[in-house]
Amino acid sequence: MTQRFSAPSWLLWTISSSFIVLVTRNPLYLVLVLVSVIAVYLSLEHRSAIALAWSTVLRIGAVIALISVVFNLLTVHSGDLQFGSLPESLPIVGGALTWNAVVYGAISGMALMCLLLIAATLSTAVDRGAMVRMVPQSFGTIGIAAIAALSIFPQTIQAIGQVRESHRTRGLQIRSIRDLQRLVVPVLDIGLERAFHLAESMESRAFGHRASGPGMPVWFSLGILVLMTTGIVTVAIGYLLAGGLILGCGLITFALLARSRGAHPISHYRESNLARPDIPVVASALSMIGVTAIALIASDDSLVFSTYPELDMPSFSVLIGIACILPVLPAILPGPLLKAEPNGA
Amino acid sequence: MLEIHGLRFQHHSSARPALRGIDLAVESGMFLAVVGPSGSGKSTLLRAINGLVPHFHGGQFGGRVLINGQDTRRTSTADLSRSVGFAGQDPETQTVFDTVVDDIAFGPENLGFNRTKIHEHVQCALGDMGIDHLCERDISTLSGGERQRVVIAGTLAMGSRILVLDEPLSQLDPWGAEELLQTLDGLRQHQGVSIVVAEHRLDNLLRYCTHVLELQSGTSVNGLLRTRTALRLLDARPALVQLAETLNWPELPLGVADARELHIRHGPVLPDQPENEFYPGITRISASEITVSAGDAMILDGVTMAVSEASVTVFMGRNGSGKTTLLRALAGLQAIDSGSVTIEDHAVSVLSNRDRPSAIGFVPQHPASLFLGQSVREEVETSTSGTGTPGRADAILRQFRLEHLAEHYSYDISGGERQRLAIAIATAATPRVLILDEPTRGMDQDARDELGAHLNELREAGTAVVLSTHDSELAARVADRVLLLDHGSVSLVGSPAFVFSNEPALMTDTGLTLGPGYLTVESVAREVGRLCRLRVPPRSGTAIFGADTGA
């Protein structure tokens, strides 16, 4: 695939953009991130199957975001800006309808759309090959699972299209919830069957081959993954020091083990190392993480925002605001497309 | 190199064993064809060679499979892959990366080759499979046949000493099939690579392979045989063997060259056949100047064609020539840039869901996408429910030899059975136009013969049938007209004899032996029968009527 920047820099861009979205509910920051990410997403080519599949997911995400606004409006009845009410006798939905609930739902929806767009951008910008090559060989078994998972998504979207098309040729329509079974069952069957065959094919093509380093035991790989996920979640919910320590331990353990077991690393047909065009993207991503982390440690009030009990204008820090628009860099940076060339080609 | 001793295997979900006591020894430089009907255990045997059975599939495994002395039970599939390269049946599900070159490099990367070696292997595999031009293409934009080439190239690039290929010819055009067989033969002869291929398309394959193993119900029928010996014993007889038997030749030919020599020596010289005239009836479905593009690539470029009632039209052409897109456009499933498709003077695009099943039946390349996740009987009943003919579902199940599978879950049946069920579903509502995209994929010879007979019945009943296939034998048996596509345009249209004469790669083995007047063994048998009824004894090397066919 032809891409502007290397896979590692896109990965760093993803981590930094997601980090900001995860640590704040300030709508001003979220809007800036959303606009920046949309600009990057639109600047990419959308011809590949996976890009088309993601556009479907984004549409579904937009619907879910809208539903979250309505759901919040109907289920949360507090707030100072009331614009209507439903009869109290109605279970759950009965009560005041407030602008506070609408705004809170919109903020949650916006955060969801930000994360989906970031994921869509990564998938569109970096091909599966580059992502697979970033999976350490020591994680052989998990690598197969990860690739099967990466594949099952576009294949499932593709399967939905195929099945709906086939239903059309049989004169069938989905009219009720019961009819959904006719769509879901074949889609699951086809998706799982394809993922199964893909995993079979990967095994047959030496993925996890012993000569490329003795594989890390599955339980150990999973353990490290759980440790690192716990670290990220702990950081995200505000326990920075504890989360950082957990993350650090996970990373160090993984690095030491991968180094000791990866005596014969696999070779790569295409290099996907950081290069000169990546410098601004990497620098901006590190800046984003740095600024956000400092703001978190300093307990910057502007990161926190709630619409309850009163709906006020959110506060704004210029520095964090600048960090929030840094994700736009890949869309505006000039320069020719970077094509990873095979060595020896 | 490869030894199999008393191999038995039963899947967890199956009531009967898939393999029963297989013994086999494959030496270096052997080209083994594993043949047999659908469900006979071919794919399971191939998976046992590279360790997918039992490591990946589980089940009860007995006996031993040794690869260069390594027991497959104690070695993982990934580790065995250094010795055994494997390519499965369905190319749609076997590519890992998004671009062709990356996917081909995947195996060599995992084997730890250095970059220069990976590059050499990849370039070599691209060249061997004739897909250099696809090198940087996104795999999702390739046709089924092109994908199949990519998958096989990925296996070749690993440089394994044993190559195991499951139905590698199933989606390849005749040019691609011949190129692949020549490549495999070159690897065998010059590098001593052992090749094991499971295949239903035997006509070309048998010319190249050295040995044959025939399976039936998981058992080896006659053990490992040299190809010439196997010709006499095979249950699924290639066209040239049938021809030799029809013409009472004392020997069986292995290829067209053999057959021509036998024909010269033993005759008879058959009279020229007048070409069958095809008189098109009322047009059922037509396309006018349709153009389809994807990005910069033109998939269909101003195609105009029509199919009349009570006729069979076959689309042929190289992989990626636009056959599937044209079929989908006719079915109203493909967005077209310009032009129009009409069925009985109505635009296909405006057909309502209710009217569609009785207007157009469509069997896609992936038959399983037609299923609803019901039992086989329910799948058919759902499609017959609107016809108002009680008992029709049972009749259809019988017609397609599916009655014994009636209560099976539709996704649990084999590839060939799925294809039959898909055709049963598509024809259940008695559509006026039936469109089939490569319907013989994965079908054994009996099923192909039945399909041919069924298509002829549909034509007799007035249905306009359109299909795409690489199977020249089937096309010769059923087609009134063949439409040859080339780079999205119609390059030739006419009777099978006319098109095949102008594009010799498509010519059937019988036609290559006896001339374009006799494309199928049936046509030869008919002529011989006619001569016998006229009491004209066929004589060796002498024309009975008319001139020598020049065969």
Image (cartoon, rainbow, N blue to C red):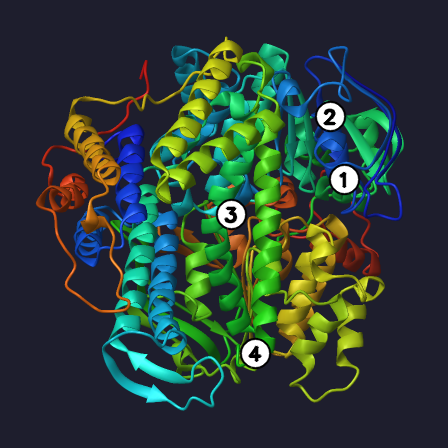
Q: Callout 2: few (<14), some (14-19), or many (20+) C-alpha neighbours within 10 Å?
A: many
For marks 1 and 3, give the one nearer the viewer. 3
In three-dimensional space, the C-alpha distance between marks 2 and 3, rounded to whole angstroms, equals 27 Å
Instruction: Label 4: state its secondary structure.
Output: helix
Q: Which subunit holds the residue at mark 4?
A: B
Query: Counting other residues with Cα less than 10 Å from the Cα at mark 3, is it few (<14), some (14-19), or many (20 or more)?
Result: many
Choose mark 2 or mark 3, whichever is in front.
3
- Residue pointed to by mark 1: B241
Amino acid type, residue under disc 1 in the picture: Val
The answer to whether residue A4 is above or below residue B115 is below
Quick check: do tags 4 and 1 share a chain? yes
Secondary element at tag 3: helix
Kindly tell me whether residue B507 is visible in this rendering. Answer: yes
Could you say which is closer to the camera, residue B46 or residue B280?
B46
- Name the amino acid, label 4: Pro
The x and y percentages for residue A192 are 60, 50
According to the picture, the residue beneath numbered tag 3 turns out to be A152
Question: Circle 4 sits on which residue?
Answer: B357
Quarter placement of the N terminus of chain A: top left
Foreground disc of the pair 1, 2: 2
Q: Residues within 10 Å of mark 1 (few under 14, many from 20)?
A: many
Q: Are marks 4 and 3 in contact (CB under 8 Å)?
A: no
